[in-house]
Image: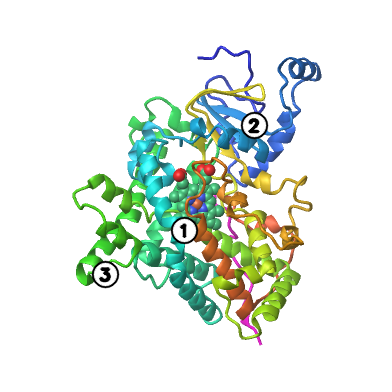
Amino acid sequence: MTMYPYLYPPGPKGFPYLGLPNAKIPTKKFWLTHIEWGKKHGAALGFTAIIIITFLLSLSLSGDLIHFSRFSKHYVVINTLETARDILDKQARVTSDRPHTRVDEIVSNLLDGLSQIPYSKQWRKTRKLFHQNLHAESTVQFHPIQTEQVWLFVKGVVLSESTLKGQIATLSQNIMFLSIYGLDISSNEEEMPTRNREAIDTFENSIIPGWDGYKYIPFIHLLPSWFPWGGRLIATIHALGEIAREGASKPWDAVREKIKSDGNHASLIGKLLSRTDPDNDEEIDRIKWFGFQFMADTMSAISTFFLAMSLYPDVQSKGQEELDAVLGKEGIPTFDDCPSLPYIEAIFREVMRWHPALPMGVPHNCIEDIVYDGYYIPKGTTIYANIWAMTHDTSVYEDADRFIPERHLRKDRHFDNINSILAYRFERRNFRVCVGRYMANDTIWLAIPSTLAAVDISTLPNENVEDYFSDGAFCSPHTLDCSVTPQV
Ligand code: HEM
């Protein structure tokens, strides 16, 4: 019930009920548009209104929060870390749901993947399963696979005929497929990783703020595919459902087949299955969806590292000098070397800050009305944390658009723990923080010193840097035109 004299946070206004028209929804590098909207609308109220309203309601007009609506559905984007902590962490009990509609039920399988499950008992059980197997101590079990695969990648990167981007994709996917399913894929062009990527690509649009507004039109899920506009969108959702089903089923069937034939339960799924009652359908389904997650992000981060090294050759040299000094010319970096390589750690931290793989994260939904700083955020609003805005906040990061690892180095050589890496969405009480962060961290970190110890990456012009990157919800260099040569 809305009994407040409160206003929605500032933001672009649309038409009654329809809200912002489709054409006004930013779909390319939209995190930048939301920063612009913050500046524009944060100060857009008339001067007198500002004085009166600010005085009466103590509203913040700093552009921290942006609001807009589509088909009566409310969207809020948070542009600052402090506000994100206040709303998404301190009020996590009411802001940890995910958006879900009747349309999403068409792709019900996608809703079974942990990242999309509504905040519920089912989510808690699934999250527990993930946490038990992916927390810091548990992910050590994947070190031998990560070490071997990174080593194979570095050995092959100079000789392989595939593109650098393709090889990085194969590295990320192979680590996931081997660790989770015990399945070896020789190339990212194989059917299983291709299906998985297709599902992620199709899913990408649905996490653009406002893009999914059509889902809130009553009865739209009933439209036949031949119906103009809405029908086509619904048909796309049906197709996504199919792709998701295949993306999860193929490796699942293959791993069960493999276990049947060789009796080897060494993979994570194998271990989980051996501990589970085969008649417990709910638990088996949870395990099935375990593997179908987020390998795209690791690939983005490693690609970003290569691009950064080609744009900032001085950083590349400094990283190599540290490796030579600590490990010697022939040394092969291992996880144990991490504490002795602060500059490498600083490069890793800067990769994660400079171009976070998911610049606007994954949307949350609030399950109750919220009043924040005098603004009204109604129950059911979809809330986005603009991670990009936070990692490019110039009051914290000077020259935020430049790649400067030194900004993370302290005199005492101390680094804040992994929960300070905003790309995974901070954790104080954020129940939805990335559950795969320890595994992702290990893969990305090891790829950095292993590459720098073995090869030189050629330079690319350091101009119009954003043009190197894709525009969609997953931020990654779209091509990597640098060449890689063995060190002499
Ligand atoms: C560079 C690598 C990665 C980045 C930047 C990243 C980032 C994120 C972000 C921003 C979220 C949303 C957090 C929120 O809603 O507040 C998320 C959720 C999630 N991530 Fe990651 N991720 C990465 C790698 C991985 C990997 C390798 C896995 C799997 C092993 C994974 C599994 C998940 C899952 C399951 C969720 C959903 C958690 C939930 O809803 O409870 N992520 N990730």
Name the secondary structure under disc 2: strand
Q: Which residues are magenta?
A: 473-488
Asked whether residue 161 appears in the rendered view, the answer is no
Q: Is residue 366 above or below residue 204?
A: above
Name the secondary structure under disc 1: helix
Looking at the rendered image, the quarter that the C terminus falls into is bottom right
Which residue is identified by label 1? 295
Checking the image for residue 66, the label placed there is 2
Residue positioned 54% across, 14% down in the render: 2
Residue at the farthest bottom position = 488
Marked residue nearer the N-terminal end (1 or 2): 2
Marked residue nearer the N-terminal end (1 or 3): 3
Name the secondary structure under disc 3: loop
Asked whether residue 102 appears in the rendered view, the answer is yes
Residue at the farthest left position = 279
Which residue is identified by label 3? 264
